[in-house]
Amino acid sequence: MKGFNVAENGGGSYRPLAILRWVMVIIFVSFGMQKFTLQSAQGIAQFISNSPFISWLSIFGLRGEAYVLGVAEFVIAALLVAGAFSPVLSAIGSFMGMVTFAITWSFFFTTPGVVTWSLSTDPMAWNLAGEFLFKDIVLLCVCAVLFLASLPRSVIRLRTG
């Protein structure tokens, strides 16, 4: 139909990305608050202990490692809020979000029992923890979009036409 564009070829404003920004703020605040509960600390312990990236957090103990992650998530949320007014803070916050979700998505592969790989008719089966982690690839991509949108146009050349 005339007047419609394939999203990848469209022009326009970055204003609709504000929805993504504020949804990510809500997500990081809610995830951060959860880290201050015993139930959440116990729930993430298996992921942390098997992670080649953040297993070192165990030096803080069960609650301490969750607190560190909770504070980090609050910092990312604050940077994303400030990023509504400052592209540099937006880029920093969204990059930190990308790192966070890259690490949490890696749990999908590093935590024993989350995924069962086979050559059968069901080549990849995951349990509830795997389902919970699988969504993080989408959240990583949302942060990547916010990060790219925060960079100066001289750094990222947008396609036109």
Image: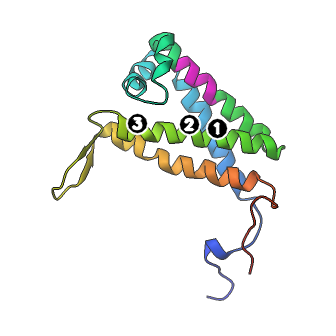
Q: Is residue 72 magenta?
A: yes
Q: Position of residue 117 (x, y in %)?
A: 24, 48
Left/right placement of residue 59 relative to residue 161 reads: left
Tell me which residue sits at (42%, 29%) in the image: 51
| Residue 14 sits in quarter | bottom right
Q: Is residue 31 positioned above or below 133 on the image?
A: above
Q: Is residue 36 visible?
A: no
Residue to which mark 3 is pinned: 107
Tell me which residue sits at (66%, 88%) in the image: 2
Residue kind at label 1, given as amino acid type:
Met
User: Is the Cβ of the residue at disc 1 closer than 8 Å to that at disc 2?
Assistant: yes
Q: Quick one: 49 or 69, which is closer to the camera?
A: 49
Left/right placement of residue 65 relative to residue 96 reads: left
Residue to which mark 1 is pinned: 96
How far apart are labels 1 and 2 at the CA level?
Answer: 6 Å
How far apart are labels 1 and 3 at the CA level?
Answer: 17 Å
| Residue 130 sits in quarter | top left
Residue to which mark 2 is pinned: 100
Q: Residue furthest front?
A: 52
Residue kind at label 2, given as amino acid type:
Thr
Q: Residues within 10 Å of mark 2 (few under 14, many from 20)?
A: many
Q: Residue furthest left?
A: 120
Left/right placement of residue 89 relative to residue 73 reads: right
Q: Is residue 93 visible?
A: yes
**Mark seen at residue 73:** none
Residue kind at label 3, given as amino acid type:
Phe
Q: Position of residue 74 (x, y in %)?
A: 65, 28
SS label for mark 3: helix
Dominant secondary structure (helix, strand or loop) of the stretch shown in magenta: helix
